[in-house]
């Protein structure tokens, strides 16, 4: 991987990071950095380990080897979870709670600003008028928008986005792009996977390829 403008002070740095399942390697060893204001796009075919890598970096799975530094300090799974915001394939909402109740619950759980205007956060992602709608009655795209509202409010410098464009229409795709641009402009960083025509956000992006044909970006 080529050096980045922030290589001297990376927000995230991985050395020899690897993961195995049932003694079979899934990815790694990997060495990469991600600096403030940067986006890193993880590439690879099905089964290459893209989602697994994000889950390891989110503290949801234990790495099989290697080490990770966050903001210059070695971290374990707990510290990775505190320093990152993870958007996965599943929205992670409570089906019977309304959109506003779900957002309030997750916001408090993540230690967000108690003065945040949660109704305005829902409106910002296109869910005005759905405050009381149970998550189970929302469409897949609306549930993704609710997850984006949660992401936007979470106080974490590192965003880990697994297929952030999935289930979204063109307006939703534009919303994701705006959120990533704002996060990077504020000194955050994003590591993401994507498929389809919308392969990357409209920001400077470096790549990390997984799989047998892995090459430096």
Image (cartoon, rainbow, N blue to C red):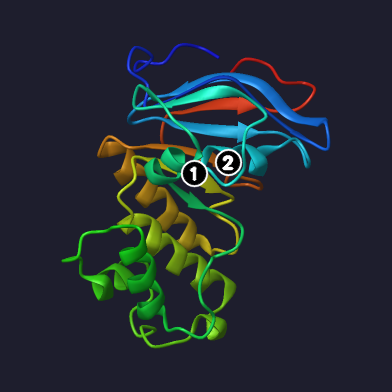
Look at the numbered disc 2 and give the secondary structure of its residue: helix
Residue 167 quadrant: bottom right
Q: Is residue 211 left or right of residue 176?
A: right
Identify the image quadrant of the N terminus. Answer: top right
Q: Identify the residue at horizontal 27%, vertical 58% (top origin).
A: 112
Image position, residue 86 (x, y; %): 49, 50
Q: Earlier in the sequence, mark 2 or mark 1?
A: 2
As drawn, the label of residue 68 is: none
Q: Residues within 10 Å of mark 2 (few under 14, many from 20)?
A: many
Label 2 belongs to which residue? 54
Label 1 belongs to which residue? 160
- Of 68 and 127, nearer the camera is 68
The answer to whether residue 3 is above or below residue 51 is above
Look at the numbered disc 1 and give the secondary structure of its residue: strand
Residue 15 quadrant: top right
Image position, residue 92 (x, y; %): 53, 66
Q: How many badges with numbers are in the image?
A: 2
The answer to whether residue 188 is above or below residue 130 is above
Image position, residue 138 (x, y; %): 53, 81
Q: Is residue 39 left or right of residue 214?
A: left
Q: Identify the residue at horizontal 55%, vertical 54% (top origin).
A: 165
Q: Is residue 177 left or right of residue 24?
A: left
The answer to whether residue 107 is above or below residue 184 is below
Per the model, the C-alpha gap separating discs 2 and 1 is 6 Å
Q: Identify the residue at horizontal 53%, vertical 20% (top origin).
A: 32
Identify the image quadrant of the C terminus. Answer: top right
Q: Is residue 24 left or right of residue 8?
A: right
- Of 175 and 84, nearer the camera is 84
Question: Can residue 199 be seen by looking at this rendering?
Answer: no
Dots 2 and 1: beta carbons under 8 Å?
yes
């Amino acid at each position: 991987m080529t050096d980045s403008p922030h290589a001297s002070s990376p927000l995230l740095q991985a050395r020899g990071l690897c993961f195995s399942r049932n003694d079979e390697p899934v990815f790694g060893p990997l060495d990469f950095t991600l600096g403030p204001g940067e986006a890193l796009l993880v590439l690879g075919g099905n089964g290459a380990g893209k989602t697994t890598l994000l889950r390891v970096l989110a503290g949801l799975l234990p790495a099989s080897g290697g080490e990770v530094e966050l903001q210059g300090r070695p971290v374990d799974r707990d510290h990775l979870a505190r320093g990152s915001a993870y958007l996965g394939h599943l929205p992670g909402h409570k089906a019977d709670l309304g959109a506003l109740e779900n957002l309030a619950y997750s916001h408090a759980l993540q230690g967000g600003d108690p003065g945040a205007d949660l109704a305005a956060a829902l409106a910002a992602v296109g869910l005005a008028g759905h405050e009381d709608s149970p998550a189970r009655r929302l469409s897949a795209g609306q549930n993704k928008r609710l997850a984006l509202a949660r992401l936007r409010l979470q106080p974490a410098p590192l965003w880990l986005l697994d297929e952030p464009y999935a289930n979204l229409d063109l307006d939703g795709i534009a919303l994701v792009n705006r959120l990533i641009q704002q996060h990077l402009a504020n000194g955050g960083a994003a590591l993401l996977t994507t498929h389809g025509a919308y392969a990357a956000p409209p920001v400077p992006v470096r790549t990390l390829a997984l799989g047998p044909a892995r090459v430096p970006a």
